[in-house]
Image: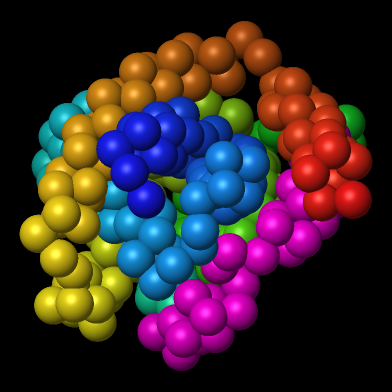
Amino acid sequence: MNVLSVIILSIVEGITEFLPISSTGHMILASTLFKIAETDFVKSFEIIIQLGAILAVLLLYWKKLLTNRDTFIRVAIAFIPTAIVGLMLYKFIKDVLLGNPWIVVWSLGVGGILLILLEKFQKEKQHEMSLFDAFLIGCAQSLSVIPGVSRAAATIVGARLLGMKREDAVEFSFLLAIPTMAAATGLDLIKNGRHFTGTQYEFLAIGFIGAFITALITVKWFIGFVKTHTFIPFAIYRILAALAFYLFVLK
């Protein structure tokens, strides 16, 4: 791993983290495309630089999260399923799922088809999110431990199936990302941080900055986009990306 690959991965993370196209999946595909070896450090890097993306959301939404008690409680409850799954399956996720481009390709393709079906058949309704709804959205998010599923897509789909409007589903996805990504980063640092070298910590710092800047731009753009557009462009992109990677890289 070198500075150029660090910058590439941080930009990929920042752009894709909050879009329904899978940041982890894209970093695995980018690593495969640019021949970045999926070492233990690279896997940790892909998790830890999410801190930069978290900071971007905190900068934009800290007031709503910290001053609205109902929102805070809903986010906390929605985080529980993913926390349980992440703790129970941490080793399996990191040793088996992360770094596997085949899983990413299938997840991207199938997820794209599901997004299209959702947009075609799901109807919005006036819906006040209950605490049980928040828990169900959290259960949906827990599926995103599979690379390529996309944490954002899983959360948004869960919220939309409950009848939430696109903009509300996206905003809740942003807020739920904060504890989810912070916990994943913290867990990986606790388990592996003591093994990192000084150079590797420098790479993490560069990745943090790159992810923060690109995530800040992306979040602002995405929340404006969903006010007047559906998720179908992202669904089509997922399918095309999966096909392209299968045909030109994996096959």
Q: Which quadrant of the figure has residue 248?
A: top right
Q: Which quadrant of the figure has residue 60?
A: top left
Is residue 36 visible to the viewer in this orientation of the structure? yes
Q: Residue at x 57, y 48 (%)?
A: 35
Q: Horizontal and vertical percent for residue 96?
A: 60, 79
User: Which is the main secondary structure of the residues drawn in magenta?
Assistant: helix
Vertically, is 117 above or below 25?
above
In this picture, residue 235 sits left or right of residue 141? right
In this picture, residue 113 sits left or right of residue 220? right
Closer-to-camera residue (82/106): 106
Instruction: Report if residue 165 lies within the magenta region.
Output: no
Q: How is the image coloured?
A: rainbow
Q: Residue furthest bottom?
A: 88
Is residue 162 visible to the viewer in this orientation of the structure? no
Q: Residue at x 13, y 77 (%)?
A: 194
Please state the extent of the stretch shown in magenta in the rendering: 87-116
Q: Horizontal and vertical percent for residue 100?
A: 66, 65
Vertically, is 215 above or below 46?
above
Q: Residue at x 28, y 63 (%)?
A: 185
Closer-to-camera residue (98/247): 247
Q: Horizontal and vertical percent for residue 233?
A: 74, 21
Closer-to-camera residue (191/166): 191
Q: Which quadrant of the figure has residue 102?
A: bottom right
